[in-house]
Image (cartoon, rainbow, N blue to C red):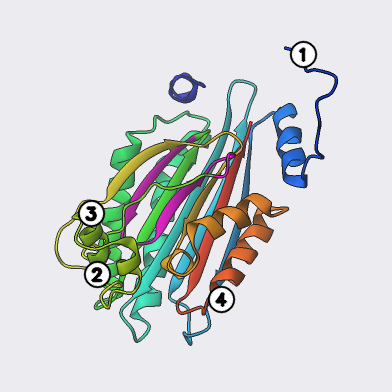
Amino acid sequence: MITFLKNLFRKDAGASLDVKTTPLSREHLRRFERQVVQYRPPQLIVGSGQSVGKQRDHNEDSLYCMHSMLSDGELDLPFGIFIVADGMGGHQHGEIASSVAARTMSEYLIKEVYLKIISPDRTPVESLHEIMEEGVHKAQQAVLKMAPGGGTTLTVALVLGERITITHVGDSRAYLVKADGSIQAVTKDHSLVGRLIELGQITEEEAAVHPQRNVLYRALGQSEPFEPDLDVQTFPQLGYLLLCSDGLWGVVSEDEIRRIVMNSTSLPDACQLLTAAANDAGGPDNISVILVQYLD
């Protein structure tokens, strides 16, 4: 299995004297320091934040973070499981649904991926796509059983080395924030307004104030069969993976999210500043955020 993982995750003039210079900012200096430092083994740096918000009386979000390192002279393999689930349904069904989904999914991934990777027997790991898909279906069955009438989004990132496998249901989001300051959503909202935007029937600005902007057409807990979205990404060099509920992205612009992430002194600080920004914008919903960086 070690050889398999190695193959799977292998990394793919003078100035004139009168030139004027300007001092480097703290962020530029930090980026330069990271570029000249080589991390052995590679590192996963993680932060998280959560808030009930200012207009809710209880929390229906759940998040899960777990990361580790296997470095045995033959393989350096950072590993991580990161989950954000945003519950819905009222009368505690939403918070139960999100908790059950996050717990079921994390337990399944630990059993089917993590324990096999660290096993002395080097137990083969099956297709990650099939494992992620089966994990979502198990979470769906657990929600139907333990939180009838409730539902939840589920956004999951499984990190093996610099490779990110993402599965997603609902309108929580995963973003990549790159070192150049650009930000890209790598999940698609399974919401009514998201679908209307795809069809060109409304604009992003209209969606932000649409009366049915919180209506999902795909979520855990719904009786209709569905397939989760699956995607594979690579950590951007010196960049970040961000997972969050709509309590953040629904009220804080992507430009502001990018600015906070890029200018914060640490990932835990960035997550606290992001939740504070959502609350400063009114805090209409629960807020959950996970921020991950891969350093090599």
Spatial CA span between label 1 and label 4: 50 Å
Ranked by sequence position, the earlier of labels 4 and 2 is: 2
Ranked by sequence position, the earlier of labels 1 and 4 is: 1
Overall secondary structure of the magenta section? strand
Ranked by sequence position, the earlier of labels 2 and 3 is: 2
Q: Can you name the residue that lies furthest to the top here?
A: 13
Q: State whether residue 46 is above or below residue 161.
A: below
Query: Which element carries disc 4, helix, strand or loop?
Result: helix
In percent of width and height, residue 257 lies at 55, 58
Q: Nearer the viewer, residue 199 or 80?
A: 199
List the residue tagged with mark 2.
Answer: 144
Spatial CA span between label 1 and label 3: 49 Å
Contact between marks 1 and 4 (CB within 8 A): the answer is no
Amino acid type indicated by mark 1 = Gly
Amino acid type indicated by mark 2 = Leu
Q: Is 167 contained in the magenta span?
A: yes
Amino acid type indicated by mark 4 = Asn
Q: Residues within 10 Å of mark 3 (few under 14, many from 20)?
A: few
- Residue at 35% over, 69% down: 208
Tell me, for residue 279, which label it has, or none: 4
Tell me, for residue 14, which label it has, or none: 1
List the residue tagged with mark 3.
Answer: 198
Q: Nearer the viewer, residue 176 or 62?
A: 176
Ranked by sequence position, the earlier of labels 1 and 3 is: 1
